[in-house]
Amino acid sequence: MHPIVLLTHAIHKDAMARLQQEAQVRVLSDPSPEGLLREIVDADALLVRMPIPAAAIRAGHRLRVVARHGVGLDYIPVEVCTELGIPVVFTPDANTESVAEHVLGTMIALAHQVARADRMVRAGRWNDRDGIMGIDLRGRCIGIVGVGRIGARVAQICRDAFGMRVLGYDPQLDEAAIASRGAEARTLQALLAQSDFVTLHTPSTPQTRHLIDAKAIAGMKRGAWLINHARGALVDTDALTAALKSGHLAGAAVDVLEVEPPAATLELLQLDNVIVTPHSAALTDEAMRRMGGDAAEDILRVLRKEAPLACANRQVLG
C-alpha cells in the first residue's frame, strides 16, 4: 500500500503527478487547525504551505517527514519534529530568482512612481503628472539585509544591470563572505544610514522580530525606500506607517505583513507611497514547479529511507 502524503494546499501539477507515482496524495479538505488535527492522523508525510502548530505534528503518529514548500522554516515547529525524530525538508534554491525579480520589479516601480501614476490616471488626474517625479536607479546605493541566496542574487542584478553600489549586512557571514557575494560589508546601522534603498532578506526569528523598528527607521537616510519581501515580523508596521506619513521614508514595497491577510482598515494600506502585494513574490510558474518538485523528491527520498538533499535538522538522520 502506498504511503499517504498530506498537502496543506495543492502544489504544481507536475509535482502532484510525481508524488502520485509513489504515494497516495491528499489535499487538506479543511485547512483549519481542527481540520488538520483530524486529517493528519494517518499521514506518512506532510507538505506545508501554511503555519503548522506543534499539536498537529504530535497528532501525526505516522509522520516520517515534514516538507516546507518554500524556504522559511517559521511555518514548522522544527524543534518538535527534531524531538520526535522527524526530518524537516525544505526547498532553499527554488524561489531565489522569482523573489529577486520581484524585489527589482517593485524597486523600479517605487523609483519611477509606477503605482502612484497608475492610480492617478485611473482617477482622471492625468495633468497631475509633474507631481510624481521619479528617480533613476543607476548610481544609487542599495543595502541588503541578509546576504543569502536571494540577497546575493539581488546584489548581482543591481550591480550588473544598474551600476548600483551594493552594501550588505549579515551577522552569519564575515566580511570576506559578504564581499564574495557582491556586497560591501557594513554594520546594520551604517547600511541603513547610507542606502537609498534597503531590502530585507532574513528569516523570521525571535532575534529578528522588528529588526526594522522606529529607531532603525530613524537611522535611515531621509527619503529612502524600504522593501520587505521576506517576513512581515521583520518590520514594525506602526513605525513604518509613521515614517511614510511623515515623509522620512519616500516609500515602501511590502509583500509580507505582520498579520496576513491584513484587516481592510490597516492604515498602511491607505497610503499612496506604498506598494503592497499578497505574499506573492514567489508565485511564478517556474518557482512553483521548482518548489513542488524539490519538496516532492525529498519526501519520496525519506519515504524510501534515503537521505534527503535539503534537511533542516540533519541530526535526526543519524
Image (spheres, rainbow, N blue to C red):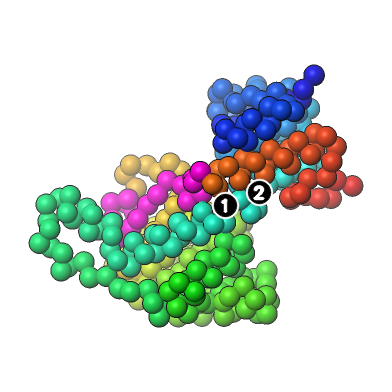
> 267 or 45: which is nearer to us?
45
Crowdedness of circle 1 by 10 Å Cα count: few (<14), some, many (20+)? many
As drawn, the residue found furthest toward the right would be 318
Q: Residue at x 47, y 58 (%)?
A: 101
Is 104 situated above or below 18? below
> 21 or 171: which is nearer to us?
21
Counting from the top left corner in percent of width and height, residue 122 is at 17, 49
Is 164 situated above or below 225? below
Q: Is residue 34 visible?
A: no
Is 185 magenta? The answer is no
Q: Amino acid at mark 1?
A: Asn
Are discs 2 and 1 less than 8 Å apart at CB? yes
Is 40 situated above or below 301? above
Magenta span: 267-285
Counting from the top left corner in percent of width and height, residue 157 is at 50, 68
Q: With 217 as the anchor, is 304 left or right in this view? A: right
> 308 or 59: which is nearer to us?
308
What is the quadrant of residue 103 in the picture?
A: bottom left
Marks counted in the figure total 2
Counting from the top left corner in percent of width and height, residue 250 is at 32, 68
> 230 or 157: which is nearer to us?
157
As drawn, the residue found furthest toward the top would be 1
Is 275 magenta? The answer is yes
Distance between mark 2 and mark 1 Cα atoms: 8 Å
> Which quadrant holds the N terminus?
top right
Q: Which residue is mark 2?
A: 91
Counting from the top left corner in percent of width and height, residue 135 is at 30, 73
Q: Is residue 90 visible?
A: yes
Element assignment for label 1: loop
Q: Which residue is mark 1?
A: 95
Element assignment for label 2: loop
